[in-house]
Amino acid sequence: MTRPAPLSGFPEWLPAGRLLEQSLLDRLRRTFELHGFTPIETRAVEPLGELLRKGETSQEVYVLRRLQEYADPRARASLTELDDRQLGLHFDLTVPFARYVLENAGRLDFPFKRYQIQKVWRGERPQDGRFREFIQADIDVVGQGSLPFHYEVELPLVMAEALAGLPIGRVEVRVNNRKLSQGFYLGLGLTDLTAVLRCVDKLDKIGPAAVAQLLVDQAQASGAQAQACLDLAQIQGGLADQVGAAVRALTDRYGAANDQLEAGLGELTGLLEAAQAALPGAVVADLKIARGLDYYTGSVYESVLEGHQSLGSICSGGRYDSLASDGSQTYPGVGLSIGVSRLVSRLIGQDQVQVTRPVPTAVLVAVADEASRPRSERVAQALRARGVPTDVAPTAAKYGKQIKFADIRSIPYVWFPGQEDGTDQVKDIRSGQQVEADQRTWSPPADDLWPRLVAV
């Protein structure tokens, strides 16, 4: 058969890339669980009616159909008509999580802290950092009826801690507060707040001049009102006092003070103070962060990887008060989502981070001859029983070839079983040091036990 062509937008990493991805995921899982988040997994499909509630993503949903439908003329005639009975692949983890909370509310304990790591699908144009199939990792805390503000402080710190433990460079979590922004816009006399937020959200992509024109065209802002929105968006900083003073000075200049703005500013400065005490420098205010989706109601977050600002936000989210509701009860929450595949593709492409070896194996047990292979297998089993990832040489070739087999795969140790009454030995093939070893007690150093992420 001819060699298959790669399918654009559906990444398949080589073993070293997959181990890099797995190491990143393991770090996220460990950090999330250390902070009390529990894992869930939701189905890959949702009814189209649920997926299409976010109108701006309607063209990106993959519709699920059975091949049999194409053979049935009556079914084939309706293939172009979408209805709520049809299914689509989920394009994020937020919509299925909201449905999951509503379906299981009677069996969940609130506040419910969940993390979810799964693949999602979007039918968008593949490009740098954007795929049609990719892995997302989400954390959310959801309450029943109410949710304390302190969770809006906790989540960005949890994500910052998880990413700070990776050799990927400095990650900065940038925060704003919807109450502050919306209060300021209302104070200016603007009424279509959703339109204003969506315009400001494009600031990094199209620049201030284009955003000012969008505000005039789409949000019915005057030139002075558009400039005031841009002035607010320029305020940045990690110190609560400085950010608070800058916002109040701007508010006084435009006469835009109101209770909603004050409430948002109080929450933002409170978040900055707590973050500065816990992880200095990890969280900063950036008042151009708007998050165009209209369900955010409080803190909003975006994260950038230093040196890779062109990649855009690698992690984003915010506070929402009514994403999940059954009509009588609301389930407010706050969440963050990291595009794992997006980050991994940049790390692989820039050769910035690598794994210490492309296979999990720490020890290769040599085979003197095929008759003694059972002895080598017993050694391997004894090492595995103590948590040492171990493989056995595929053939009883000369020891030099078996060592080369290990070296090509960066397996650090080769084990040489003795005779039935002899002594085993293990060789560190990097240093050449070879010592006597007992399969019941010997273990490699901690740094060699499993592959690790290291900066190049």
Image (cartoon, grey):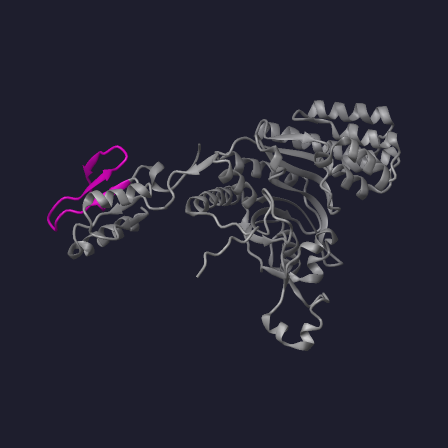
Q: Position of residue 53 (x, y in %)?
A: 73, 56
How many numbered marks have been drawn onto this rendered protein structure?
A: 0
Q: Position of residue 189 (x, y in %)?
A: 89, 36
Q: Position of residue 433 (x, y in %)?
A: 22, 34
Res. 350 in view: yes
Residue at position x 63%, y 72% in the image: 70
Indicate whether residue 255 is drawn in magenta.
no
Indicate whether residue 434 is drawn in magenta.
yes
Res. 441 in view: no
Q: Position of residue 27 (x, y in %)?
A: 48, 41
Q: Nearer the viewer, residue 9 or 370?
A: 9
89 relative to 306, above or below? below
Magenta residue span: 413-442
- Quadrant, the N terminus: bottom left
Residue at position x 42%, y 47% in the image: 15
Residue at position x 56%, y 53% in the image: 119
- Quadrant, the C terminus: top left
Left or right: 3 with respect to 415?
Answer: right
